[in-house]
Image (cartoon, rainbow, N blue to C red):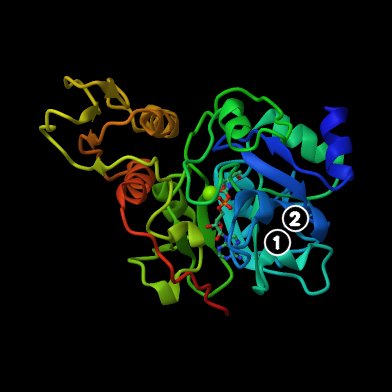
Amino acid sequence: MQKYIDILASGDLVGLPTETVYGLAADATNSKAVAKIFLQKNRPGFNPLIVHVTDISAAHDFAIVNPVYEPHLEDLWPGPLTVIFPVRPHSAISPLVTAGLNTVAVRIPKHDLALKILCAYGKPLAAPSGNISGKVSPVLATHVEKYFPNIPVLDGGACAVGVESTILDLSSRTPTVLRPGGMEIEALEEKFNVHIASGETPDTIIAPGQLSRHYAPDVPIRLNVLTPNDDEIFIGFGEIESDYNLSVQGSLEEAAANLFSLLHLLSTQKAPAAIYPIPMHGLGRAINDRLQRAACQEEHNVQRVRKR
Ligand code: TXA
Ligand code: MG
């Protein structure tokens, strides 16, 4: 563990396990270190990063947390949830992290090693998913090592959730889900009167994970397929005959946990893939969202971040 702390303190990057996906972490208060994330990932500079902390009190240093929401957040964190707050002026967070926005994304991961390293390091860590921009997110240490052979990765095993955190925007009047993810929207609806950001136009992309082509495994993918073509690798869900299955039991949790490993696997096979329909409730929203982006063939060149 000390090795990773020393690397972070020297302004370098570390692969970090979380319950959702592996992150590529840097000291969020060190602009030079944060810049290395953008460089390594080939990430557009205006795409802001999530700041990871151990608890809400640590977030108060740089985020303005509405006290009305705090008890709800105490119930939901640690967990696969990222919340957007107004950023506290003159905070120690590097402006590169927020990409010049007046908001900041905060997450408390539910993973022993992630919390241990955050606790031992004592400063917030900026960490996007540990993949090259546009590619499939890593859910194993080896996935990160493949993308970034020179960056040390703290191995925390396979990610239990398997899709990125749900992003909830609490910076404006209506709590809005910007990205479906590992925390079910139904769990948020209980606590907040949530609105779900709909559609996507280049002008309103505020979480660039919303760019349509993302998680792309370099092979054509068709969704909602009941009968595959002869040349297609068929990916099932539930008890159906297929080449691979996201969850024979029909469990959305299991399917989410298997999703990115399967997309990594498809990248290594040279055949097109067809995917059986995945139900659209609970984690099914996040799974379908990622699958649609993986299946999207067109690159988005217009990548603007709305300023508020
Ligand atoms: O599960 C996760 O969230 C993982 C693990 C490593 O924590 N991280 C992750 O980070 O998925 P990343 O960078 O791949 O996705 C973060 C998303 C991006 O789409 C980014 O645009 C959005 O969060 N984001 C960050 N700050 C924001 C802000 N102030 N307003 C709106 N969106 C923001
Ligand atoms: Mg990502």
Q: Quadrant of residue 28?
A: bottom right
Nearest to the observer: residue 68 or residue 114: 114
The kind of residue tagged 2 is: Val
In what element is the residue under mark 2? Answer: helix
**Quick one: label 2 or label 1, which is nearer the N terminus?**
2
Q: Quadrant of residue 66?
A: bottom right
Residue pointed to by mark 2: 34
Q: Is residue 219 left or right of residue 99?
A: left
Mark 1 residue CB less than 8 A from any atom of ligand 1: yes
- Contact? badges 2 and 1 (CB < 8 Å): yes
Nearest to the observer: residue 67 or residue 206: 206
Residue 270: % across, % down:
32, 31
- Residue 198 vertical position relative to residue 267 in the rendered view, above or below: below
- Ligand 1 occupies quarter: bottom right
Residue 245: % across, % down:
29, 23
- Residue 196 vertical position relative to residue 226 in the rendered view, above or below: below
- Neighbor class of circle 1 (other Cα within 10 Å; few <14, some 14-19, many 20+) is many
Residue pointed to by mark 1: 97
Mark 2 residue CB less than 8 A from any atom of ligand 1: no
Residue 144: % across, % down:
60, 34
The residue positioned 20% from the left and 22% from the top of the image is 242
Residue 47: % across, % down:
58, 63
- Residue 80 vertical position relative to residue 253 in the rendered view, above or below: below
- Neighbor class of circle 2 (other Cα within 10 Å; few <14, some 14-19, many 20+) is many
Q: Is residue 248 left or right of residue 67?
A: left
| Position of the C terminus by quadrant | bottom right
Q: How many marks?
A: 2
The kind of residue tagged 1 is: Val
Q: Quadrant of residue 130?
A: top right
